[in-house]
Amino acid sequence: MRYGFVPDRLEETVARTASRKEILEGPIVRTMFRLAWPLMISSLLHYLYNMADTFWVGHLPVSENASAVAGLQIAGPVIFFLMAFAFGFNSGGLALVSQYMGAHRKEEANTAAAKTLSLSIAFGLFIMVTGVIFSPALLRLLTSDPAVARAGTVYTRIIFIGMPFEFVAAAYAQVMAAYGDTITPMLVNLATVIANIVLDPFMIFGWGPFARMTVAGAAVATIICQAIAAVISLVILFRGRHGLRVSWRDLLPDWFWYRRILKIGLPASIGVSGTSFGFLVLTGIIGRVPNATVALSAYGIGDRFINISFVAIDGLSLAISTMVGHALGGDLRKRANSVVWTGTALMFGILVGEGTLLRVFTPWLFRAFIPTQPAIISEGVLFMSLFLPSIPFFGIVNGVQSAFQGSGHNTPPMIMQLVRLWGLRVPLSWFFGFAMHMGSRGIWTGMLISNVLAAVLALVFLVTVDWHHKVIEHTSALAGAIDETGTSELISTLAEPGV
């Protein structure tokens, strides 16, 4: 792929979503949506990757589709688990870039963005090797059905080969959002998701010149599109036409900056990896009910519908983090506080409406995705009936976590994530599912209760823990301290970020 792939006309039409002044002083809801709408579309496009895979695989012959859909479902938690710890460190880069921009220190924001990207490339390579080696053993722990395990293994091993591309594209989207540009990453996602949706049926069913690859075809289509997204992201950053600019030299290792990013991001990484392991265990619990293949397939399809309903929440969450980071960087604590409470209430209300709408269309949606499996459709309706009332409470959890992530204080979100999965969801799902002999119905009930209790815990953290301290240096005199010698001159003067 040549660097000239991104046309100049496209680059010239893309502008930052909101200026620094708007982020710091503009009306909260309007500014939040100006930042969030491209993020919402990007999130929707991200979910469409998985949704397209599941949709087309669900239309394989009846002898293959149930095990194939279940295989994709058990593949998700394994992929999430192996990449989560490294992925969580992007939050350190987000906090630094957004707070430096709020403090009007663009050179340091550029440096933080470059080092976040280079660290992500290294993590992506490591996760690629780890995933290819260890994912088959993890999948075998989640299900006793050989056909499901086989389908999951084929899918995950191919996906992990493309992991460096996934890490580059994700880091790019985060640092650009922290800077204030959420439109450019959205356009990158739009192009690659359209390509993925088009490629999927050709590679899964063997249309045209392609061989019939079934589950493997879904994975190959995904990594091709991730590679395209990574190349476009790097081209845009190297050209620097959208604010942030990096060079190949900027990507060289810098242990001072790496230590800052890792220190801020470590609690988030622990929380995300702990959460991912919780979902892995939860999937294993579902895989041990009497109707395991049916339950896993119903959960997998239903989970994708719920994720689609979260697109607004994903966008608003990152918008809240960006606005909080800018506000704290500019020493506007009151503004940061208003952003968090307004954004959290907004997310709760949106999820109430979306959950109600989704419940109305649940039977039709399941019939569209896997029309030849009435047992899976029936189980899917049960899952959605029990779990959907709890999703507005997840909006509260997201709003509170966004406050802490934007401020760079990731220990409280880490605790919230671990308690939500390990203190609530996993034990409650096992208790109702097996100790109470309720089967899959009990698991869905435990998931519902866990979301409600997690929201209560999040609100307790928000009102009792002080998250208003920024993690960048407190003196503006350092804004011009970087000279041609690079960042080394700052090592003796920059304060260590607090947690």
Image (tube, helix red, strand yellow):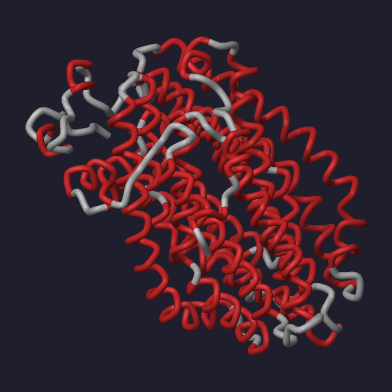
Asked whether, in this view, residue 91 is left or right of residue 197, the answer is left
In the rendered view, tell whether residue 474 sits above or below residue 45.
above
Q: Using the rendered image of the protein, determine whether residue 51 is visible from the camera's viewpoint.
A: yes
Asked whether, in this view, residue 143 is left or right of residue 422, the answer is right
Along the line of sight, the residue nearer the viewer: 5 or 242: 5
In the rendered view, tell whether residue 309 sits above or below residue 212.
above
- Residue 402 location (% of width, % of height): 49, 33
Q: Quadrant of residue 289?
A: bottom right
Residue drawn at x 90%, y 45% is: 360
Q: Quadrant of residue 300?
A: bottom right
Along the line of sight, the residue nearer the viewer: 131 or 77: 131
In the rendered view, tell whether residue 230 sits above or below residue 53.
above
Residue drawn at x 79%, y 33% is: 353
Residue drawn at x 64%, y 25% is: 33
Number of on-image labels? 0
Along the line of sight, the residue nearer the viewer: 64 or 160: 160
- Residue 347 location (% of width, % of height): 65, 30
